Image (cartoon, rainbow, N blue to C red):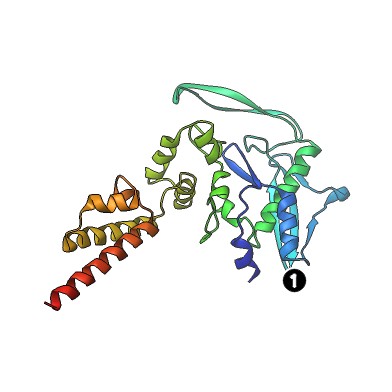
Amino acid sequence: MKFEELSKISVNGHTENKNGLTYLSWTWAWSEIKKHCPDATYEILRFENNLPYVYDENTGYMVFTKVTIDNQTYEMWLPVMDGNNKAMLNHQYTYKVKEYKDGSWTGGYIEKTVEPASMFDINKTIMRCLVKNIAMFGLGIYIYAGEDMPEGYEITKEEAERIIVGYGKYAGKTLKDIVEVEKDKKYLMWMISQDGTKQSLKDAISKVLSLPSEEESKQRIELQNDINNLVLETDTDIDELKKYFKVNSLSELTIAKLTECKMILEKKLKKEEKNGSSK
């Protein structure tokens, strides 16, 4: 039950994006876990000389944590890496990557450097490992699955605005930034139109742009079709309807107003049918 409960919690607004990866604040994650699971405990595993890591000359550093909730314990591990997700050693080393210019490979290579790991790097990795460990119990696990929101979660506009785009020309910016700072709603509309955009992100963009949901769009179409048929059956003047609702087009009406319009026309139709049958 705890997994189901924790996996439905949105952690958006408590994350940061670096190099296309999303990191959840360990302080918030642990605070949230304790709210839901007061008996939760964690352990940072220690090894030779009481050090909180193991080290291998060839592969680098690795840290380990354990989290226990409701007498269930899960262990997690994480390598110490630099900002480019390269394993850090106890000495500096270099590696080569392809060189790109204007999005195309030049045919050459450039050299990059990995600095030796410090205790700061190890400490940071331990806390990231703890967050990953907590995700094994459900909290924030959707991040590791590459999703933007928990499954079945109904996102609010405020939460949607805080979502960070992880790719493209606005990588690292929130949806709100793209709308209010970059003034580029067209880019978000383009994202919605792409098959590769996750549905959860499309839903969030729709919230930010105040676009109707798929269900709302379907409902609107059905109402408009019903109204069109009733207009013909009752020989109603469309202009009179627009004047009544103070709009230039019936498509401007909200779902609530479209429903009201349909009810007015249905009453008119019943009245006409009743009058017709009494003659």
Query: Which one is nearer the viewer's eye here, 251 or 78?
Result: 251
Residue 61, position in %: x, y?
A: 73, 43
Q: Which residue extends farthest bottom?
A: 278
Q: Is residue 49 left or right of residue 14?
A: right
Determine the residue positioned at 74% across, 48% down: 127
Which residue bears the numbered disc 1? Answer: 71
Visible in this render: residue 194? Answer: no
Q: Picture quarter containing residue 79?
A: top right
Where does the N terminus fall, quadrant-wise? bottom right
Residue closest to the far left: 279
Q: Secondary structure at mark 1?
A: loop
Residue drawn at the location 57% of the way across and 49% of the way down: 159
Residue shown at 73% from the left, 39% from the top: 57
Q: Left or right of 237: which side holds 216? A: right
Q: Amino acid at mark 1?
A: Asn
Q: Where does the image place residue 156, in percent across and percent down from the top left?
A: 54, 53
Q: Quadrant of the C terminus?
A: bottom left
**How many marks are shown on the rendered structure?**
1
Q: Measuring 68% from the left and 36% from the top, which residue is drawn there?
A: 82
Q: Position of residue 230 (x, y in %)?
A: 22, 62
> Does residue 112 appear anywhere in the picture?
yes
Q: Is residue 129 above or below residue 122?
A: below
